């Protein structure tokens, strides 16, 4: 009978939502040792994670913009530097010109947070530095909070599973099953957040952009073509252009003139002879 009352009391508590369930379960663990959870030692309290996290958790990210005539060499040196500190190249994208030479490249690398500053300085020396920046975000409180919430939910799930095994009423079994499903979903979401925070605070992200230096063309002086000599030179060039165009047109017409002369001159002579023969003699009446 006492077990049934305990079961009904727990079921009534679960009806108020996932957040209040976690709080009530956490409070109950202060009076009695929790059963052994899947991810924590026996008798571990919900707030034990606070003492486990003693180091500061910081997410560091940075971007570096370089120019270099030999992008391939920069890429190789960058990969070796990252590997030397225990990091990895997360992804890389390179664009080549028509000659097959690397025109620009972007590398995203992950390095241990303790090697972030030294790796960033080393990468900046691989080419001509154009711009660099970095950001740091302290997530220590978030890591502790998420860890405690994960432990609290895990303890609550363990207790619900134990009570579910002891329940004999079908309605109670269904309620336990519904509460377990809800809390397990919340637990998976929290674990995903926890894994992300731990990964980002353990391995920093650096993005390296490398491009070829552009050829700078100095602006043209507006008065470079001014003056008498410049005008004379421009006039002479214009005259040469007119003569060239005229000769080009004449050269294009010569074949037509020759063809016209070869065909037109004999035709004109024949027509003239015919007209003379048809002309009446003087004094003849037609």
Image: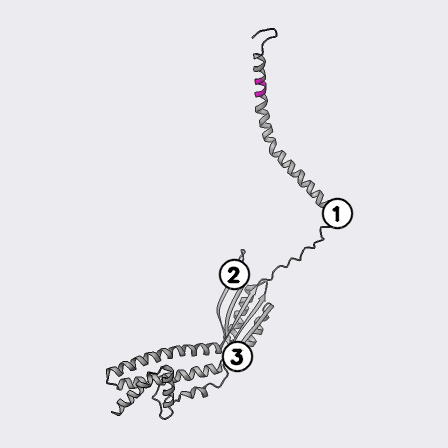
Residue 114, labelled with which disc? Answer: 3
Q: Judge depth for marks 3 and 1 and give the one in front.
A: 1
- On-image quarter of the N terminus: bottom left
Residues 207 and 183: in front is 183
Q: Is residue 2 left or right of residue 56?
A: left
Q: Is residue 246 above or below residue 126?
A: above
Range of magenta residues: 266-271
What's the residue at 55%, 70% (across, down)? 63
Q: Is residue 269 covered in magenta?
A: yes
Alpha carbon distance from label 3 to label 1: 69 Å
125 to 277, vertically: above or below = below
Of the two numbered discs 3 and 2 on the same chain, state the one appearing first in sequence.
2
What number is the disc on residue 215?
none
User: Answer yes or no: do the residues labelled 3 and 2 have beta carbons within 8 Å?
Assistant: no
Q: Name the outermost residue toward the bottom.
A: 31
Q: Is the magenta stretch mostly helix, strand or loop?
A: helix
Q: Is residue 246 magenta?
A: no
- Residues at circles 2 and 1 in contact by the CB criterion of under 8 Å: no
Quick one: 23 or 75, which is closer to the camera?
Answer: 23
The crowding category of the residue bearing disc 1, from other C-alpha atoms within 10 Å (few below 14, some 14 to 19, many at least 20), is few
Which of the two labelled residues, at mark 2 and mark 1, occupies the earlier sequence position?
Answer: 2
Which color scheme did the rendering employ for the protein?
Answer: one colour
Q: Mark 2 points at which residue?
A: 95
Please name the residue that numbered disc 1 is placed on.
229
Label 3 to label 2, Cα distance in Å? 32 Å
Secondary structure type for disc 2? strand
């Amino acid at each position: 009978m006492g077990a049934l009352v305990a079961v009904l009391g727990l079921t009534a508590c679960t009806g108020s939502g996932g957040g209040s369930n976690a709080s009530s379960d956490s409070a109950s663990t202060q009076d009695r040792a929790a059963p052994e959870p899947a991810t924590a030692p026996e008798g571990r309290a919900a707030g034990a994670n606070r003492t486990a996290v003693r180091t500061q958790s910081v997410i560091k990210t940075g971007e570096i913009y370089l120019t270099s005539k030999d992008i391939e060499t920069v890429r190789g040196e960058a990969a070796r530097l990252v590997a030397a500190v225990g990091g990895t190249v997360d992804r890389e994208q390179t664009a080549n010109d028509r000659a097959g030479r690397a025109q620009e490249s972007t590398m995203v690398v992950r390095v241990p947070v303790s090697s972030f500053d030294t790796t960033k300085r080393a990468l900046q020396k691989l080419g001509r530095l154009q711009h660099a920046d970095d950001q740091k975000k302290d997530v220590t409180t978030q890591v502790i909070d998420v860890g405690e919430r994960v432990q609290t939910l895990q303890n609550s799930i363990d207790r619900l599973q134990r009570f579910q095994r002891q329940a004999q009423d079908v309605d109670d079994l269904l309620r336990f099953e519904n509460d377990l499903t809800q809390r397990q979903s919340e637990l998976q979401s929290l674990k995903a957040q926890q894994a992300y925070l731990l990964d980002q605070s353990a391995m920093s992200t650096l993005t390296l952009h490398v491009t070829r230096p552009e050829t700078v063309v100095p602006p043209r002086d507006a008065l470079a073509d001014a003056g008498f000599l410049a005008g004379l030179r421009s006039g002479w060039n214009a005259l040469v252009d007119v003569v060239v165009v005229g000769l080009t047109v004449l050269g294009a017409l010569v074949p037509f003139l020759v063809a016209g002369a070869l065909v037109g001159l004999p035709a004109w002579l024949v027509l003239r002879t015919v007209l003379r023969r048809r002309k009446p003699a003087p004094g003849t009446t037609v």
